[in-house]
Amino acid sequence: MKNYKILLSIFVVYILINMIIFPSLYIGQTLAGLNAWAMNVLPSVLPFMFFTKILSELGTVEKFSGVFARPMQKFFKAPAISSYVFLMSIVSGYPVGAKMTADLYQSGKISRSEALRMCSFCSTSGPMFIIGAVGAGMLGNSKLGYIIFLSHILGAFLNGFLYRNIKARDIEISPANNITKNKTDINTIVVDSALSIISVGVIIAIFFCVITSLSPLFNLFPPQVSGLLSGVVEITKGCTDIASTLPANFAVMSATFIISFGGISTLLQSLTMLSKLNMPVGLFALQKFSHALLATIISVLLLFLSGLF
C-alpha cells in the first residue's frame, strides 16, 4: 500500500509539473474534456438520472418488474427490479446503471448482496455511443457497431451469471450506511442528479489531462498498442485511436474489450455513484475485466459468423 501511494504521489507531481510547464496545453485538454461531457454525456445521461430517480421513488418500477421476477432470480439471483435497471443501463449507458443500483440500495429496496450482483451486469454502455459514435462514426460501418453492441450486452448477461453467488456478508459494512429515506421531494432529486452528473464531468476532464501526461509513455509503443492503452484509461480516446490504426475485425475486438471494461475514467465515474453501497474497488474492477473478456470472446464468434474474420 505504501508503494502504491508513493507511485501515485510521483505521478501526480509529474502531472503538476507538466501543467506548470505547458499550461495552455492542459487548459485546452481540460476544456476539451468538459466540452465532450457537455456535448455528449450531459444531454443524454442527466434526463435518465432524473426521471429514473422519480420512477424509483414513486414505486412505479416495482409494479412493472414483477413479470421478470422468476427469470432474474433464477439466472442472476437478483430481484425483479434489476431487469429495469439493466434496461435503463443499456439504453442510456455509463454510469446510469451504477447510479440506479446505488439509489435502490440506499432506499432499502434491494439488499447489499443483490446490489453487488447487479453491478456485474447493470453497468453497460449504450447504443448511441457504441453503434452511432464507434460503429458508424469511428469505424465507418454501423454493422460493426451492432456486433460490438451485441457482444457487449451478451457479455453482461454471462457476467451476471458468473457473479450470481456474491454475498454481502463477505464484505460487511455498517448498517448506518444503508439509509432509507422516508420522503424525497423534487428538490432533493434535482440536487442529487445535478451533483452526480457534475462529478462525471469533473472525472472526464481530469482524465483528458491524465492521457495527455501519459502520451509520451504510450508513444513508445506501436500505434496499435498505444490505442488500446489509451482505451484502458479513457474509452472515447482509445476507440478513436484503434479505429484509425487497426483492421476492421481487430478494431471490433479491441473496441469491444475497451467499451466493456469501461476504462479507468468510467470505472471511477461508476464508483463515485456506488459509494453509497461501499462498493469494493477490486471487486468492481474484476467484474468489469471479466465482462470485457467475455464480450471480446463473443465478438470473435460473431465476426466469424458474419464472415468478417
Image (cartoon, grey):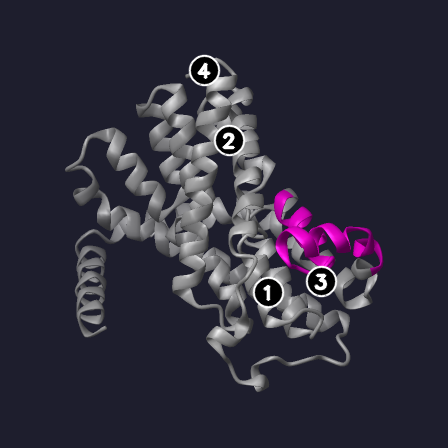
| Disc 2: which residue | 148
Asked whether residue 126 is drawn in magenta, I would say no
Given this view, does label 2 or label 3 mark the residue nearer the observer?
Answer: 2
Q: Is residue 123 above or below residue 107?
A: above
Tell me the SS state at disc 2. helix
Say which label, 1 or 2, has the lower sequence index. Answer: 1
Check disc 4 and give the amino acid type. Leu
Q: Nearer the viewer, residue 20 or 232?
A: 232
Check disc 3 and give the amino acid type. Lys
| Disc 1: which residue | 115
Tell me the SS state at disc 4. loop
Say which label, 2 or 4, has the lower sequence index. Answer: 2
Check disc 2 and give the amino acid type. Ile
- Residue located at (69% from left, 80% from top): 180
Distance CA(mark 1)–CA(mark 4): 38 Å
Given this view, does label 4 or label 3 mark the residue nearer the observer?
Answer: 4
Distance CA(mark 2)–CA(mark 3): 29 Å
| Disc 3: which residue | 53
Q: Where does the image place residue 78, in percent across and percent down from the top left?
A: 66, 59
| Disc 4: which residue | 308
- Residue located at (57% from left, 38% from top): 154
